[in-house]
Each structure stands twice: as C-alpha cells, then as structure tokens.
Amino acid sequence: MLIRLDPASEMPIADQIVTQIRRGIADGDIEVGERLPSARDLAAALAINMHTVLRAYDSLRTAGLIELRRGRGAVVIAGADAPTTALYAAAAALVRDAARLGIAPADLATIIRGMT
Amino acid sequence: MTTDRPAPSAPDEPETGTTPVPADHVPAEVDGVALLRTSSAAVAALAPAALLVVVALVVGPQLGDTIARHWSGDGAADGFSGTWSSFAVVAAIVAALTTVSIVAALTRRGRPSRLIAGGAASFAGLAACTWVATALATAAAPTPEEAVAGWTPALTLPGLAWGVVVGWLATGSGVRALPDVEFDDRASVRPADLRPGERLAWSGTTGSPVFVVMGSVVMALAIVSGAVLFVMGASSVVVYSAVLLLAGAAVLALGRVRLTVDHRGVRLVSALLGVRLLRVRLADVAGVETETLDPMSWGGWGLRVSKRGTAYVTGRRPGIVVRRRDGSAVAVTIDDAESAASVAAALAQR
C-alpha cells in the first residue's frame, strides 16, 4: 500500500489518505482482510499528526470499508462494489480527458467543487 | 574428488555453464565427511534417551512408588514424587528434545544445525540426568526418605555438556548445495516519480505460519520444561528454560512482519511483537533492486545473516534488495516488491 501526500494540494491531508485507500481498495491493490498500518505508524511514516490519520481511518470506518479494533488496528472488511469501481474508472477517464485539454487534476477538482 | 562420483539428482556436467537451474532442483553433491558427522550427531543425540531407558530398566526394580525429587541444603531428601509419573514426564520431554535435535542435525546446515541440535541435546541430557540422579540416589538408600543427594547432582553437568558433543558433530546434511547458485532475475527498478515536497509512505506485510507454529511450540516446551525442572527441584537450571523461552519468542516475532518505506528509511518491524528487525536509513542507500530471494544464497529461512547480507526470507519468493553504501545489503521477501523498491529508490535519490 502506497500513500502519497501532496503538500501543494488543496485537499486536506486526511482526505488525501482516505481517497488513496479508497482507490487502493477499488483497484484491488488493497485486499479484503488486509491490515492497514497502525495510525501511529502511518503518522510517523508521513510525518503528520496521528489524529489526522485517525480522522481518515474513522471516515473509512463510517463508510463501512474498514474495521477499527483496539490492539488489532485497521482491517479492510469490504471490497469495492461494482458501482464504486465504475465511478473510479470514470473519474480516471475524466482526469485523462482534462489532461488532454491542459487542465491539471487540481484545476479539475476546483471545477468539480464549483458544481456542488 | 567428488566430481566423478555419479550423483543421481545432479545434472550431468555441473560446469560453469549457463543452463538455467530449475527452481525446485538445487544441484547437490554428497560430502562423505559431513554425512558421517551428521549421522554421528543424530546417533549421539539419542544418548540421553538411551541413558534414561537403561537406568529405568536397571535401577527401576529397586525403586518403590516414590522417588526423592528435592534435596535440602545438607543433601537430605525433603521432597518426593511418584517414580513412574515423574519418569513419564521426563521421558516425554527427552523424547521431544531428542526429536528436535535429530531433525535439526539432519535438515539444517552449518551453524543453525549445530546450535539447534546441540542446544536441544543439552536440555535432553539435563532432563534425563536429573531423573537418573534422583533414581540413583533413591535406589542407594533403604527408603526414599533416607536418600541423600551425595555426588549424584553432579551428573547433570555431563548431561548438559553432551549438547556440546552433539553440536560439534553436527554439520548439517551430508548433501551440500553447490555454492553460488544464484537466480538471474535481479532487476533494477525505475524510481517512482516524485513531486517537490511530496511525502510517500509504502507499507506491506508478509510472514510465515511456520515461524508462528515453531515459536509457539518452543515457548510451550520452555514453559513445560521450566515447570517440571522447578517441581523436580532443579530450580537452579530453570534459567535454561528462560533462555529457551526467549528463543521461542524470537522465532514467533518473525511470524508476521511489516515492511515500510518512507522518510525514516526501509524498515522491517515484527507485527506481532512490535520489535524492529531491520533498518536502512535513506542516506545509507546505494541502490535498490528486486530479486527472487533464494534461501540457499541468503543463509536460509527466517532472519538470516550471510555473506550477501542480512535478510528476512520466508521462502524462494520475490523480494526487495537494498544495498548500503558500505557494501552490505538488506533483503526482504515481500509481495509487490517492485512498488516498494521504486519508492525506496525515489526517496533515496531525493
């Protein structure tokens, strides 16, 4: 499992973590039953506050993707369903189309945010 | 020497040729001396069990239902247990340790073979001689209550020392892998693309149920043998059980591990015990590659130190190899080694 944090991104760090773990699960890179690194360890690895990682894990738990147990850490309990996988594929296609038009992913994100 | 000896499993001409080695058939030759020593070690490992049986047969008829098992400071008996119930417990321990010793002598190579075969034979000798000592002391007295220790506790020393003999004899199997069998799938990796200021954290777990089972069995054996030695009055040697307990914990720690690659470097931490097993700082990284790690060329299974470097190996599996600037290397078998290696290479370049 690889987590990248882009400091230039407007997206909050916790959301960057959530997005990448969601994508990892959708891609099949992260399998059901896999144990994620402990919040303490991931925070140390990324040199960020542990509460930021805990916030990310908590939102994944609320989404029903992982289970948090004291002492056992975070375990992936749900794989990606077909609609979610399709959504990620559509998003990837959108990013590719935007790149062709010279629109960077960050700008694309701004466009999408303006729609809501 | 041995080159003209027909070796059924070896290829016809094990020359320096480029014939790819089938993964499951490491070429081997038979080493006569090693074979002789290995068989001698296996036979020697049987000695404690043999001594126990012989003494039980010879001295047993003179023993009653109880046997002295503990001695007060002046050497008089002050603790007793059932003759044959204590024999059964000791016999079970000796049988288990003897099995471990013989299996290690026959299947492991080099130093691990010596340490495990010798260590297990030591404990077997100690357990057997402790019972033999109490049996002899009890048989020499009219009743168990009148038994005195006399010289018999000294018997435990040759019992313990027997392990040294077994360890010295053990060299591992007489079938020896030909040296320098390497697998030529070593590949350099393309460093992952990094944006300025971007932070990366790669993480993956691996492990082997074999280590979990082995570690648990050794720890259970340590606890049982410690309890029995304590009850039999040999409380001064319970420290050996403590050593065995630690050895079991060390094996158990290898059962589940997590590899992380980030700004702290490439680290391997036991997921079960939280102990850090390996670490290479990013500043020390000279190069990163992937390779199918062969236990034969990395010193065996588990956490190993060999000429090639330090490695965590669970079998012949793909892994990451990190070379340090001082020439040493660290290798770990892990799923998705390419991804881990490309992150390590990118971070090390920064």
Image (cartoon, rainbow, N blue to C red):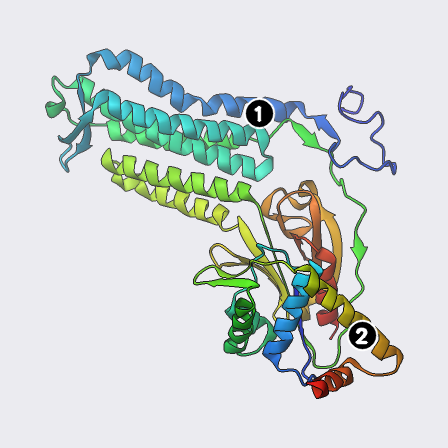
The x, y position of residue A82, in whole percent, is: 69, 60
* Neighbourhood count class around disc 2 (C-alpha, 10 Å): few under 14, some 14–19, many 20 upward: some
Frontmost residue, B158 versus A107: A107
Labelled pair 1, 2 in contact (Cβ < 8 Å): no
Question: Viewed as shown, does residue A13 lie left or right of A87?
Answer: left
Tell me if residue B192 can be seen: no
Amino acid type for the residue under numbered disc 2: Leu
Q: Do circles 1 and 2 both sit on a common chain? A: no
Q: With B259 as the anchor, is A39 left or right in this view?
A: left
Q: Name the residue under label 2.
A: A94
User: How many badges with numbers are in the image?
Assistant: 2
- Residue B60: quarter of image: top left
Which of discs 1 and 2 lies nearer the camera? The answer is 2
Q: Indicate which disc residue B37 carries.
A: 1
In the rendered image, the vertical position of residue A76 relative to residue B63, given as above or below? below
Q: Is residue A72 above or below residue B240?
A: below
Question: Few, some or many C-alpha atoms within 10 Å of disc 1 (few <14, some 14-19, many ≥20)?
Answer: many
Write down the chain letter for disc 2: A
Type of the residue with mark 1: Arg
Q: Nearer the viewer, residue A16 or B190?
A: A16
